[in-house]
Image: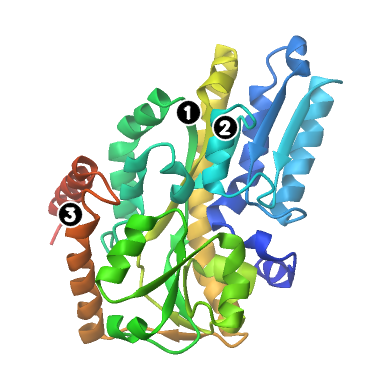
Amino acid sequence: MNIKRAERSQSGLARATVLWLTQALGAVALLASLAAAPAAHANNKSLRIGSLVPKNSLYHRQLLEVADAWRTAQGAGAKYLVYPDGSQGGEAEMARRMRIGQLQGALLSVVGLREIEPSIAALQAMPLLFRNWEEVDHVREKMRASMEKKFYDKGFVVLAWGDAGWVRFFSKEPAVRPDDYKRMKFFAWGSEPDQQAIMKSLGYTPVPLETTDILPAIQTGMINVVPSTPYFALATQVFNTAPHMLDINWAPIVGALVVTRKAWDEMAPPVQQAVRAASDKAGEQIRTKARLEVEEAVDAMKKRGLTVHKPNAEQMKEWNDLATKLYPRIRGSMVPAETFDEVMAHLSAYRASKPK
């Protein structure tokens, strides 16, 4: 990703998407083309993919290049359609459209994936649980087979897993302690009432909005804080209005490319094998690129006025204490109790296996 190019991009709030989604777009084109490739008689079929990815972005252009190559190889009649810019609605709406056949696939974060399978929230909704990416990778891989089976049973096939960096807090005013944020108003996903209830119970003020509302909301003062990955803040220019970033790894942003089981079953077995191989490679590339670009995005914003606040040991203890208070509230509400316990068991075993 060319960070300077991202800085210059001014296409509006459609850019408010999770980083790994933008990075996965080229992979979507490849997977979709493979899915449509088994035989000439399949050329009358369409594969429609929903996305929040902005039109004319770098990855959209990559998609068009791959799509052109695919159409050339497949011949007249084959149709590959991507709906960028959230034109098919938010993530919850795209999940609904897949269920009724208006879309065959989508790039979704946990916010959309939990509309299909709620237990997926365990990978993203447990703040300050994971200390590093190695722990995230370990837990995800331990749970991958069972999680993908749950999606399959509900009519969806997971083709690639990705992540987009760590959530950090971007605010209008400097803040380093948990109590500093109690006087502020947080952006919160409109589709996550459980999260909002937990925040309110702890003295915080969530303001439920859609992604497209973030920039005008923070510009007008409707909200003061945006929990965000650094790339999101850079690409949307949120940091210009909220120029203070708290440097903690609050939670990883996790997502996946999914297609409907109906679309998957219509693929010939050799095509399914090719899609699996391509998706494994794409997922690895997505994760690698996303993690590298986090600090690049922070550096780019610092050059344009971002102030980074890093908690000291005493302040970090306050954040860890807050997370500890949150876990019992999250278990059984935002994350099914059984899945919560499974994550904790995998993580505990992993840490015990590491040298002290």
Let me know if residue 272 appears in the view: yes
Q: Residues within 10 Å of mark 1 (few under 14, many from 20)?
A: many
Q: Earlier in the sequence, mark 2 or mark 1?
A: 2
Q: Secondary structure at mark 3?
A: helix
Depth order, front residue of 335/355? 335
Look at label 2 and name its amino acid.
Answer: Met
Residue that appears at 75% across and 38% down:
66
The image shows residue 280 at horizontal and vertical percentages of 49, 35
Q: Which-is-in-front pick, marks 2 and 1?
A: 2
**In which quadrant of the rendered view does residue 232 lie?**
bottom right
Residue that appears at 55% across and 19% down:
262
| Structural distance between the alpha carbons of marks 1 and 3 | 33 Å
**In which quadrant of the rendered view does residue 248 lie?**
bottom left
Q: Secondary structure at mark 2?
A: helix
| Structural distance between the alpha carbons of marks 2 and 1 | 9 Å
Depth order, front residue of 84/221? 221
Residue that appears at 32% across and 56% down:
194
Look at label 1 and name its amino acid.
Answer: Phe
Q: Which residue is mark 3?
A: 351
Relative height, residue 350 to residue 14 (above, below): above
Relative height, residue 251 to residue 70 (above, below): below
Relative height, residue 285 to residue 6 (above, below): above
Q: Residues within 10 Å of mark 3 (few under 14, many from 20)?
A: few
For the residues bearing labels 2 and 1, Cβ distance under 8 angstroms = yes
Q: Which-is-in-front pick, marks 2 and 3?
A: 2
Residue that appears at 13% across and 62% down:
356
Q: Which residue is mark 1?
A: 156
The image shows residue 338 at horizontal and vertical percentages of 19, 40
Tally the numbered discs. Answer: 3
| Structural distance between the alpha carbons of marks 2 and 3 | 39 Å
Q: Which residue is mark 2?
A: 98
